[in-house]
Image (cartoon, rainbow, N blue to C red):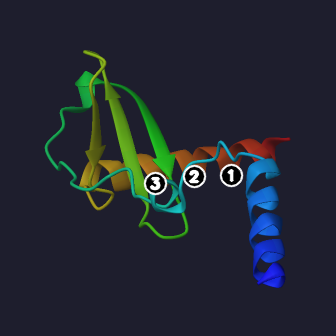
Amino acid sequence: MDLKLLALMAVLTVVTYAPVSHAKPLSLVERCWCRTTASTVPQRSIRELRFLHTPNCPFQVIAKLKNNKEVCINPETKWLQQYLKNAINKMKRSKQAN
């Protein structure tokens, strides 16, 4: 009986003095930002683009619009593919010039 009580007291002591973690639960950390994507976002309404690549999610493109709304854009969209290709070529030329 004393051994069980001692074990219980040890467990309660560890739980009481264990540091509290302020990190997000694993299930929230690994969620994909984009659950649905839009293919028909007018380019002139986009203020900025963000690109996210997380281990458990596919490549994600988030557009912040001029009205401060954020939408996910389908990465397979033709104009976006061309935009990315142009940006990569521009970076390559910039590195070659230096």
Is 85 displayed left or right of 7 in the figure? left
- Mark nearer the N terminus (1 vs 3): 3
Instruction: Report the Cα–Cα distance between label 2 and label 1.
Output: 6 Å
In-front residue for pair 32/16: 16
Instruction: Report the amino acid beneath label 3.
Output: Leu
Residue beneath label 1, please?
92
Instruction: Report the amino acid beneath label 1.
Output: Lys
Q: Is residue 38 above or below residue 50?
A: below
The local crowd at label 2, few if under 14, some if 14 to 19, many if 20 or more residues have their Cα within 10 Å, is few
State the residue at coordinates (17%, 50%): 39
Instruction: Report the Cα–Cα distance between label 1 and label 3.
Output: 37 Å
Q: Is residue 71 above or below residue 8?
A: above
Q: Which mark is residue 28?
A: 3
Asked whether the residues under the numbered discs 2 and 1 touch, taking CB atoms below 8 Å apart as contact, a structural biologist would say: yes
Is 36 displayed left or right of 33 in the figure? left
- Mark nearer the N terminus (2 vs 3): 3
Q: Secondary structure at mark 3?
A: helix
Instruction: Report the amino acid beneath label 2.
Output: Ile
- In the rendered view of the protein, which quadrant contains the N terminus? bottom right
Depth-wise, is mark 2 or mark 3 nearer the camera?
Answer: 3
Q: Which mark is residue 78?
A: none
Instruction: Report the Cα–Cα distance between label 2 and label 3.
Output: 32 Å
Percent coordinates x, y for residue 12 in the rendering:
74, 60
Residue beneath label 2, please?
88
Percent coordinates x, y for residue 88 in the rendering:
57, 52
Q: Is residue 62 above or below residue 65?
A: below
